[in-house]
Every structure is written in structure tokens, then in C-alpha cells.
Image (cartoon, rainbow, N blue to C red):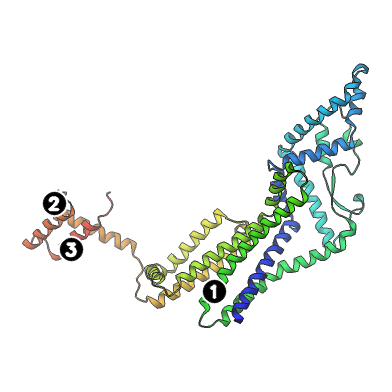
Amino acid sequence: MLARALVVVGILLLVVSAVANFVRYEALDSGQFRETSRLLITNEEIQPQVAATLVDALYENVDVATELEDQLPDNLQGLAGPIAGISRELADRAARELLQRPSVQNIWVDSTVLAQERLVRVLEGKTRLVATSGGDVALDLRPLVTRLADRFAFVSNVSDRLPEDAGRIVILRSDELKAAQDVTQGLKVIAAWVWVLALAAFAAAIWLARGRRRLELRAIAIGFVIGGVLLLVVRSLAGRYVVDSLVSSESVSPAAREAWNIVTRLLEGSGWSLVIVGVVTLVGVWLAGAGPRASGVRQALAPWLRRPELAFGTAAFLYLLVLLWQPTPQFGRLLWVLVFAVLAAVGVEVLRRQTAREFPDAVGVDWVGGTRERYEAWRVGRQAGHGATPPDGVAAEVERLAALHASGALTDDEFAAAKAALIMPPPQG
């Protein structure tokens, strides 16, 4: 019972660690945040919403109608208001086109990463809140607003006329600093050490379960699958709650869902990684079991497993294919790549030792020698038959060879080789 309790505790710790590491990497790692920011600004559902935010910031800080009235002739100044309304629609279209340009996307990425780096320094206590933001940490989209305004000739000297807080989105207010710093420090500790405690719980459970360690390993594998599914369910339910609570208009919902999917893709990857590791472990547990089918598979694999270069070489090749496929982001991170590689190597070695004990007489496969023997058998059979093709198929050819053997034209070895060539002829050259 103690071993099974440790398995349950280990799974819970692993789930908590997965959530903590997701938040840590997504919020505090600049490289990961830069990648996420670029995925956000290149998404076709999110771009229109960012464009609308830029246009709103421009029209809130620049009186476009007054600008037009100053530039129109006296007899047309009454049209400044309607033209300003039409120009807003043009501005929306221009903003969308602007955000499709790589140079403008780079401005967005640099702005968001700069805000994230400032936030991280503040949360880690490395700097005070910047005074230019009124004691707050904010995302500054002013360069994008200026870039948009420059496309309209009727708005001159926009960069000089826009206030400093134009296009600024507050991320962290000064009165929230202490609580945010405490959460950050706790999060870093959980992300760094809880997974170690989970592995220790699994190791202790296996050590305690003497005589039934395979059953405990199976329980751990099932727990991995359950934990992974739990993460996927939590992500889905949390996404629905966040989108429904933050979005006031149905037209914004698609963009909000896309943003949630992009931001939480590491959490999704953690869930699927646990499922994959659990399923692979379950296959290994079954293969090492006492069932007749598993035993038959081990017997068939024994000749290959006896040769380390074949066993580990095949496993390494399959693992490289998985890394090229990269089913989850975790398979692209060096730490997890090494952890998965070590687990795979241990599993192969355990299976090799088990098959060596069960089938000590298994002989490695000699591909070259086997091919040579089949070729020699085919050649002897062709010579004995004088190159003739059997008119009535294999049965007729065997009868003809039997007659030659009975008459003494073929020796026992030649007759056996000729029959083998009929059953398994080599590929035609």
C-alpha cells in the first residue's frame, strides 16, 4: 500500500511541476516569450484585434476631424466629420496590412519582449518599477501607433503630438508588486525541485515493491497517462473560462481562443508528453510480462537484442525520428531530450538482459552469410535444372528434382539446396 501511495503522490507532484514549469517558461523565459509573441502577431485571427487596438489608440489621441478641417477648403470643412469616419475604416484596413509586414511584426515582438524583460527584472527584485510608467510595468505600443499614423498625410508630426502613454497597456501595477514577487519566487522553487521529488517518489515505490515491481511500474505508467489527460482537460476548461470571462464581444472570441491556444501550447505539450511516455512504458511493461504473446515476441527479438549495436542502434534511430517529428515542444528541449534518451536506453538494456536469461541459445542474425547461402542454393538448383523453368509450377519442379535425386543425378546436399531455392528464391538480379 505504501508503494502505491507513493505512486499517487508522485503523479500529483508531476502534474503540479508541469503547470509550474509551463508558467515559468512562458512568463519568465525571454526566448520562449519571444517565440510566443511572434506566433501571436502572425496569427490571422489575432492580427485584426491588434490592428483595432492600434487604430483606437490613434483616434483617442489625435483629433482626426480637426486635422481634416484645418486642411480642407472653407466650403468643404463641414465634411471633415464624415471623412474622418471613412478614414477610420481605411485606418483599420491599413493597420491590418501593416501588421502583415515582417518589419512591423519585429517591432511588436521587440516591444512585447522589452516589457516582459522589465517585468521579470521587477519580479525578481533586480530593479524598481520604472518611473516613466507611473510606477507600473506596461507594454508600449506607441511605435506601432506612430507607424500607422505616418501612413496618413493629413496627420503631421504624429510622434511629437502623441502623448507618452499612447498605446500603453499596463501589465503590473505598483500596488501588486509584493504579491507578484512572492508568487514568482514560489513558482521558481516549485518548477525547479518538485519534479525531482516526483521521481524520488517513483523510485521509492519501485524499491519497496519487491516481487511486484512490474505492477508498480505499470501503475506509474497508467498514472502518467491519467496525469497527461488531466493537464489537457484543465487546459481546455480553463481556456473556456478565461475566454468567456474576458471577452465581452462574440466577434473577439476567435482571437481570444487562438491567443489562449498559443500561450498554453507548452502546457498542452506537457500533457501529451506524459501520455506518450506513459503509453511507451505500458508497451514495455507488457513486453516484459509473463504472457505467452509477450514471451513469443521476446523470443523473436532475442537474436537481435543479443547484439548491442543492433538493439541500441535501432532504438537510437527510432528516437531520432521522434525528435525530427517533435510531437510536443518538450521533445525540442535539451533537458527532456536527455531524460527521454536515458529512460529509453535503460528500457532497452533491461529487455536485453531479460531475453538473454530466458533465451540463452539465441544466435545473432548473420545477414551476409544467410544471403550467401540462399544464393548458393538457388545457383545449385538452377544448374541442376539446366536453367529450365518449371512448366507446372513448384510442385512439378520438386517432382522432377526428386526423380533426378532418385536416379543419382543429384546428391543429397544438391537436392536439399535445390528444394530450398524453390521455397525461398533470391531476388532476380
Residue 230: where, in percent of width, then height? Answer: 63, 63
Instruction: State the CA–CA distance, disc 1 to disc 2.
Output: 62 Å
Q: Secondary structure at mark 1?
A: helix
Q: Which mark is residue 416?
A: 3
Instruction: Using the rendered view, name the quadrant where residue 426 is placed.
Output: bottom left
**Which of the two residues, 168 or 309, is positioned nearer the viewer here?**
168
Residue type, mark 3 in image: Ala
Residue 62: where, in percent of width, then height? Answer: 89, 34
Q: Secondary structure at mark 3?
A: helix
Instruction: Using the rendered view, name the quadrant where residue 424 is placed.
Output: bottom left
**Camera sees residue 141:** yes
Q: Quadrant of the N terminus?
A: bottom right
Please report whichever mark, 3 or 1, sits nearer to the chain's N-terminal start. 1
Residue visible at 72% across and 64% down in the picture:
20
Query: Looking at the image, is 370 positioned above or below residue 208?
Result: above
Residue type, mark 2 in image: His
Please report whichever mark, 1 or 2, sits nearer to the chain's N-terminal start. 1
The residue labelled by disc 2 is 386
Looking at the image, do the residues carrying marks 3 and 1 touch, with CB atoms under 8 Å apart? no
Crowd rating for badge 2 (residues with CA inside 10 Å; few <14, some 14–19, many 20+): few
Residue visible at 48% across and 73% down in the picture:
350
Number of marks present in the image shown: 3
Please report whichever mark, 2 or 3, sits nearer to the chain's N-terminal start. 2
Which mark is in front, 3 or 1? 1
